[in-house]
Image (cartoon, grey):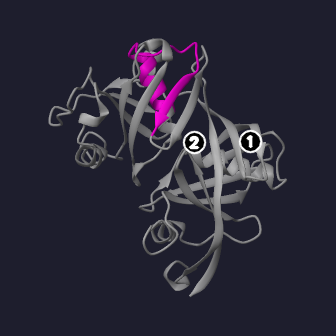
Amino acid sequence: MSELQYLRMHGCGNDYVFLDCFQKPPPQDPAALSRFISDRHRAVGSDGLVLMLPSDVPTAVARMRMFNADGSEGSLCGNALRCMAMWLHQSGRAGPAFQIVMAERLIGVQIVHSDPDCRRAVVRIDVGRPAVLSADSGVRSCVREQPLADVAVPGLQGLPLHVSLGNPHTVFFVQSIAAVPFEQLGPRIERHAAFPDRTNVEFVEISRPSAANQATVRVWERGSGETLACGSGACAVAVAAVAAGHLQSGLPISVQMAGGLLRVLMSDELELQLEGLAEECCRGTVLWPRDSFE
């Protein structure tokens, strides 16, 4: 057995084990390590593993790699990015505005507020533009109607909308989240034949009155199952809700998830920003069977 030092941080309850790979080399098999360390009964417990690495891009402060609890590597993770940004800033590696590389994407970061004594911060990141999925104009071009004839969702309002932010999301607007059999539908939709690479799943209830510009969301994350929050999911919900006419793009969009509130801002050019709380909850050492991972 070997000892592995870690940090555990979360964004609105979406928690990850972070490894400081500035001082030590990264693990040779991070996918296997993520499956081990994410186990909430036999190891640290988390929604996945994050490697915080030196950047190989001159304009960026650092590189991030994120692995889901099942070992699959993610291409975008808004909550983990905000947590890593907080750590970079509070550890003196970065100022209040900088860039992080993830999956060949440069992510702009702004530290809105930092409390190093409590190891928490409000962080805003530039998510960029959603992918174009149709020939429509404006935000409608960034969604694709995704009928699933063999999936019955109680209280479904309109067809599900598919959104891509580098990772796939399928958004279901429903009358009541409480009426949705979440534990059955989440994994079924994630692995539906319509999604060869699987998909993240968001069930969304729009707050009334619509002037609140707020949505309540329950999310099933690809590779991790239910999570208390999903940063890219919040952005996908904002895109789908504006495209469907439920919410307005000219105002901040509040996305209430089980773990807390995230805020999405969408520009006229469809550039997305995600803002929310990041917090460190513990540091420690975990024993791991080194031969199994290297």
For residue 21, the mark is none
**Residue lying furthest left:** 150
- The answer to which image quadrant residue 136 occupies is top left
Q: Is residue 123 magenta?
A: no
- The answer to which image quadrant residue 123 occupies is top right
Is 182 left or right of 258, judged from the image as shown? left
Looking at the picture, tell me which residue is in the foreground, 6 or 134: 6
- Residue pointed to by mark 1: 99
Q: Is residue 175 above or below residue 121?
A: above
Q: Is residue 135 above or below residue 280?
A: above
Residue at 36 percent across and 43 percent down: it is 199
- Residue pointed to by mark 2: 78
Is 134 left or right of 59, judged from the image as shown? left
* Magenta stretch, residue numbers: 235-257
**Whole-percent x, y for residue 146 in the image:** 28, 28
The kind of residue on which mark 2 rests is: Gly
**Whole-percent x, y for residue 113 in the image:** 76, 38
